[in-house]
Image: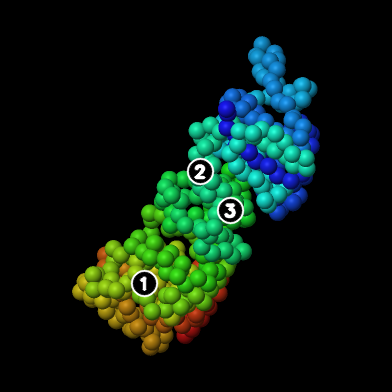
């Protein structure tokens, strides 16, 4: 006797749900999983063309599906009939996205969940409908049996192992295969072999008509926001432990933490006694500088440090728009001699009146194009200036000194106006 997977929900489905294209009671309901009304038709087409047996009952009455060979422009296609009546639908509907066995099962189960939170999902060899319900039976193939035995890998709505939830995400333990799994409203919408520390469910994930994630970056933004507002210090520690050591390797390394949401105070509690360094700065650090420091991607450390500037992060500026750098405690004699010459040159000019507070430090900038920066009253010069002459270095010193004196940032109109005023005042001076 053939076994089936039974999916039963409250309410009797209307026959038109299988025949009217574009008709959907969920189109304007954001609480529902489906959108376009075509998914159920695609599911039926996929089951028919893949010769997977299924039966659908409206209450106690079975809705009968069959195919009818039709000719169109010398091609033969299979039109779908519903209760013996030909429809405009064919078995080619939906395309290859729906040929994996999970796709029609996901759609049918999702539609049932839309109507009833207590959907019946069970194996059975008894095929019959019940008054007041919609009952769908899908042949228990090997693939369907695998889905049923591993239901939490495909639907997390009944998974009791949720670690935490907030308005952006629910966090679950990582997938059994260690890869990336994303769920939208409890339904799997994305999976990849990319290693991930956790699996995620979110109502914000954007899906296409096939219920597949269609905005991968937007999903990462939602997950990052969910992590930032998290108040679970243990999970925050686990995330930091999973990310430490580099800036790549897991799905979470790719999360954009520079979102408008602020980090919760729990993040500060976890991080305040730790010492950090951006993974991107490692090549510029001496071994002694790295002792006791946690290596994390700068995509996490920069927004974290901008919010909590009392954290110990090697290589980051306190400035909102500052470049990342690592102080060079032993710059070359060639460079320091050139800087001394540049300062001497400037002190012999009228600019010397603006040089009383110059505090020079040297650094390796993570961005190789940065040659200098004003930071917290200091003038930070790149070690790459070693190949330039004293005249060129003097110009860099003037620019960074004026940033410190004026308080205006790089590439701003205020700073341009400040320099133009200095230039004009010099032109008209006696």
Q: Which residue is mark 3?
A: 158
Regarding mark 1 in the picture, which secondary structure is present there? strand
Q: Against 335, is 404 above or below?
A: below
Nearest to N terminus: mark 1 or mark 3: 3
Q: CA distance from mark 1 to mark 2?
A: 43 Å
Quadrant in which residue 351 is drawn: bottom left
Regarding mark 2 in the picture, which secondary structure is present there? helix
Regarding mark 3 in the picture, which secondary structure is present there? loop
Q: List x then y, in percent, for residue 283.
A: 28, 63
Residue drawn where x is 72% and y is 36% of the image: 129
Q: Quick one: label 3, few (<14), some, or many (20+) residues within 10 Å?
A: few
Q: Is residue 313 left or right of residue 159?
A: left
| Circle on res. 149 | 2
Q: List x then y, in percent, for residue 292.
A: 29, 74
Q: Are marks 1 and 2 in contact (CB under 8 Å)?
A: no
Nearest to N terminus: mark 1 or mark 2: 2
Q: Considering depth in this image, is 52 or 330 the residue closer to the camera? A: 52
Q: CA distance from mark 3 to mark 2?
A: 13 Å
Residue drawn where x is 50% and y is 39% of the image: 146
Q: Against 299, is 266 above or below?
A: below
Residue pushed farthest top? 74
| Circle on res. 276 | 1
Q: Considering depth in this image, is 235 or 428 the residue closer to the camera? A: 235
Q: Against 29, is 66 above or below?
A: above
Residue drawn where x is 43% and y is 81% of the image: 310
Q: Quick one: label 1, few (<14), some, or many (20+) residues within 10 Å?
A: many
Residue drawn where x is 66% and y is 11% of the image: 74
Q: Is residue 12 left or right of residue 146?
A: right
């Amino acid at each position: 006797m053939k076994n089936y997977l039974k999916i039963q929900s409250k309410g009797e489905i209307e026959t038109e749900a299988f025949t009217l294209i574009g008709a959907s009671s969920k189109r304007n309901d954001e609480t529902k999983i489906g959108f376009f009304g075509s998914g159920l038709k695609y599911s039926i087409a996929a089951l028919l063309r893949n010769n997977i047996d299924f039966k659908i009952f409206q209450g106690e009455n079975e809705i009968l599906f069959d195919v009818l060979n039709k000719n169109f422009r010398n091609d033969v296609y299979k039109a779908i009939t519903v209760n013996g009546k030909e429809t405009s639908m064919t078995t080619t509907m939906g395309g290859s996205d729906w040929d994996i066995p999970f796709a029609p099962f996901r759609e049918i189960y999702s539609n049932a969940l839309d109507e009833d939170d207590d959907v019946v999902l069970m194996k059975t060899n008894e095929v019959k409908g019940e008054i007041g319900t919609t009952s769908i039976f899908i042949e228990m193939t090997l693939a369907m049996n695998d889905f049923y035995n591993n239901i939490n890998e495909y639907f997390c709505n009944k998974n009791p192992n949720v670690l935490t939830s907030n308005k952006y995400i629910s966090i679950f333990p990582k997938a059994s295969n260690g890869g990336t799994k994303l769920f939208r409203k409890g339904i799997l919408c994305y999976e990849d072999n990319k290693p991930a520390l956790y699996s995620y469910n979110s109502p914000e994930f954007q899906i296409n008509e096939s219920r597949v994630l269609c905005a991968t970056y937007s999903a990462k933004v939602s997950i990052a926001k969910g992590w930032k507002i998290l108040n679970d210090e243990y999970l925050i520690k686990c995330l930091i432990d999973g990310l430490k050591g580099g800036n790549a390797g897991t799905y979470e390394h790719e999360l954009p933490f520079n979102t408008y949401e602020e980090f919760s105070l729990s993040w500060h509690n976890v991080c305040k006694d730790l010492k950090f360094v951006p993974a991107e700065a490692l090549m510029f650090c001496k071994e002694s500088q790295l002792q006791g420091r946690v290596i994390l991607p700068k995509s996490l450390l920069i927004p974290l440090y901008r919010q909590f500037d009392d954290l110990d992060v090697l290589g980051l500026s306190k400035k909102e728009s500052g470049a990342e750098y690592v102080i060079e405690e032993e710059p070359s004699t060639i460079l320091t001699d050139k800087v001394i010459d540049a300062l001497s040159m400037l002190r012999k000019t009228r600019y010397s009146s603006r040089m009383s507070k110059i505090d020079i430090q040297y650094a390796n900038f993570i961005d190789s194009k940065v040659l200098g920066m004003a930071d917290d009253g200091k003038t930070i010069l790149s070690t790459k200036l070693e190949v330039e002459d004293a005249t060129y270095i003097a110009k860099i010193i003037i620019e960074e000194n004026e940033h410190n004196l004026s308080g205006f940032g790089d590439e701003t109109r205020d700073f341009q106006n400040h320099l133009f005023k200095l230039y004009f005042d010099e032109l008209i001076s006696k």
